[in-house]
Amino acid sequence: MNAELPHVLIVGCGFGGLEATKVLDGAPVRVTLIDRSNHHLFQPLLYQVATAGLSAPSIASPIRHMRRHQRNLTVLMAEVTAIDKARREVHLADGQTLSYDHLIVAAGATHSYFGNDQWQAHAPGLKTLADAFKLRARLLSAFEKAETLADRPAEREGWLTFVVIGGGPTGVEMAGTLAEIARHTLKDEFRRIDPSRAKVLLVEGSDRVLAAFKPAQSAQAQAQLERLGVTVRVGCRVVGIDETGVELQKPDGQRERIASHTKVWAAGVAASPLARTLDVPLDRAGRVIVDEHMNIPGHPEVYVVGDMAAAHSLEKDGSRKPVPGVSPGAKQAGRHAARQILARLQGRSEPAFRYRDYGNLATIGRKAAVADLGTIQFSGFSAWLFWLFVHVYFLIGFRNRVRVFADWAWAYFTFQRHARIVVEPQQHGDPEEA
Amino acid sequence: MNAELPHVLIVGCGFGGLEATKVLDGAPVRVTLIDRSNHHLFQPLLYQVATAGLSAPSIASPIRHMRRHQRNLTVLMAEVTAIDKARREVHLADGQTLSYDHLIVAAGATHSYFGNDQWQAHAPGLKTLADAFKLRARLLSAFEKAETLADRPAEREGWLTFVVIGGGPTGVEMAGTLAEIARHTLKDEFRRIDPSRAKVLLVEGSDRVLAAFKPAQSAQAQAQLERLGVTVRVGCRVVGIDETGVELQKPDGQRERIASHTKVWAAGVAASPLARTLDVPLDRAGRVIVDEHMNIPGHPEVYVVGDMAAAHSLEKDGSRKPVPGVSPGAKQAGRHAARQILARLQGRSEPAFRYRDYGNLATIGRKAAVADLGTIQFSGFSAWLFWLFVHVYFLIGFRNRVRVFADWAWAYFTFQRHARIVVEPQQHGDPEEA
């Protein structure tokens, strides 16, 4: 590559970073893409890895393999610890620095425990493959642990109670799938416990699940969850989490303790801590407030896109609407940033960012979903088929599509989940200690 | 189940424990099978998981799912820490005890570093799925690390040198596959390094690789490895391993240091430490010396099978031959122990154990192998096809066979390996710290 060409550095290879990289393919720039991991992850299906329905390679691809034909691209697996916007440099964890002419920061989000970081050990979230494997080991090991407690039936209750905290799409997906695993997948496999009697609770602080959807759809989703055996607790705030249970504050203000060894956090996210090193205004979730080109104030060469950014869409009527933290938002913002870089190199500018809203989709178990496509809403089996089509369609790579489709066809007709593998032995009560 | 029936306790669900369990299906006994993990592992293909060719579910199945139809079986995921043969009890890590009438111990083997346990952190072995994931992360991260070292070419050498220690079947498979990954799988994917210039060394202390085979076949295997780009160093003893390299003692007594960040231990195994808690005579590898029915002295109700046992086969000519530490040996011994339990319940005894030797097979990369079937020996592509057929045939479950075959067909024609996923980010030089 010609070292004289402008250097575009992209931090993070989620949906935003990957789209930006693609736009720059063939352009007269040098591109460096840095990610902490070696793979792009199709996060919308991560809950399937956590619940043993899919194996990791089905939803993850090595970045350098996906982009091997892009000749102006160098992929580095490294961790960016800080950004020095004055010197136009980023610092890597191994002490190296990299300079840039244009920077796109797309480092995503992490879990937020709203100041209760001690909850993290007891209620892990779901952002990375490592998270998914940890959750998978805990979920499956809980049933195993209950089966070993022949002489201690009183202890079993807590091992057969699963609490999912947060009623957004991830929480709804996790709770629905967990109920199915208990009712169907594990059927007839235990001798001392009945997995179908396991309790799955979905706890949501607001008054309905799937708050991004219309109220009627929230009600449909809740009914579908309850049909699967999930206990939905809306209006309940989590005020405590420890190794053996969860403390709730009910709508009437009273407190209730639920004995549960296995908790899943799907309640809050915060922008990557890298945002703070930019030294620019952040919103309450730690997101970088960006302008109509995803730039930070005073630095048209620095872009922040995706879950790290608080971005707005300039609507046709001149109003400004927040861009939601979903994959189409990240993709469109990533593309916009890359196009704006190319425009600026030609002395032009793109029109202000406008978000194209394709609607909202959430799935609930193996044959129900809710879809809100703006003009129409539908739910149930037709929504589930639509969800399936959309997700398999957007999944990375032909081979992964075929694999996932085959895995699902198998799972659908047999109720089996092929990836029920606990990699680390989980023995001593607290799975994460093993 | 009828609690009056004799209780057979089986510790470990490798090849030996699983076969014993199957023999007892439908018999008038209660069976409890305990394993530290939730899955049976098809260990002969574990190196494929370590080298990203297969994902974990392809070679592992949940034990309780495999045996869900066996009504007289209870499966427990738990760790046995000690055996009290006088009280006929086993102790679990969580403090529970389980009593037995008949006990089959099949807890397998672990790595042996010949008294140099400090080597383990730098040269992990390959026995469990957790081992395979650790190795996979190290192998793939080494190339990634080399790519990041733009300004430090001198450091790259050690990241692009891979040392496999031990020239048995596992070492030969690992070295051959590693050479293929460097030459073919990663081709065109890096911008600053040329992966095909990576060095793969196979170090063996004796004077030839695959010592269990005939000398002519060892020579063929070495030639095939060298054709793949592996440097085979026979007659070299490893005398030191640290984070950045390996120290060899050459045949002439001189020492040589090889700079390498990535080492694989395939040199020595020792029986599970559980053997020591039996308080009976062990051989030098810590294996329990068992009689012609796999019993320990004075305890016809206690059997030890598989890699934990030093067993002998009573040949037709009356001679006694050691049973090799391979999967057919473990399977046959497991079956023998279970049959002897049933025979004793009927007041009979089985004839003394006789090992049926089907021969030896080892594969070298994607189209060569060596086979020694006793009466005939062959090598090259025909041996590779034979190896493929045997391994897929014996693999657990129809679905896994189809998956593995599909994965291999894909890998064979595209040179790609679909499971190239590093789950834990590996950053700071020493991958295991991440």
Image: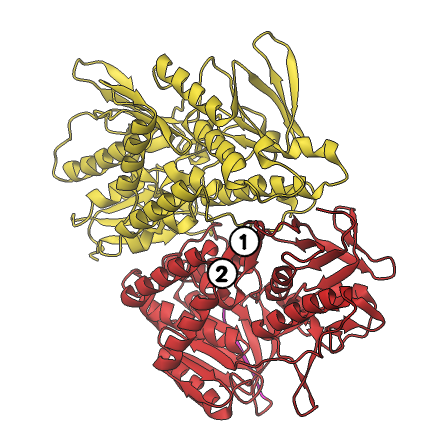
Chain colours: A red, B yellow
Is residue A256 magenta-colored? yes
Residue A411 x/y as whole percent: 33, 64
Give how far apart the Cα atoms at labels 2 and 1 are.
Answer: 9 Å
Kindly indicate the quadrant of the structure image that contains residue A330.
bottom right
**Where B53 falls versus A163 (above or below)?**
above
Q: Residue at x 37, y 13 (%)?
A: B215
Q: Is residue A275 left or right of residue B353?
A: right
Q: Which residue is mark 2?
A: A396
Q: Which mark is residue A66?
A: 1
Q: Tag 1: Cα neighbours inside 10 Å, few (<14), some, or many (≥20)?
A: some
Residue B111 visible to an observer of this rendering: no
Magenta residues span A254-260
Mark 2 and mark 1 in contact? Answer it, CB < 8 Å: yes
Residue occupying the point 75% across, 73% down: A349
Secondary structure, mark 1, is helix
Depth order, front residue of A149/A314: A314
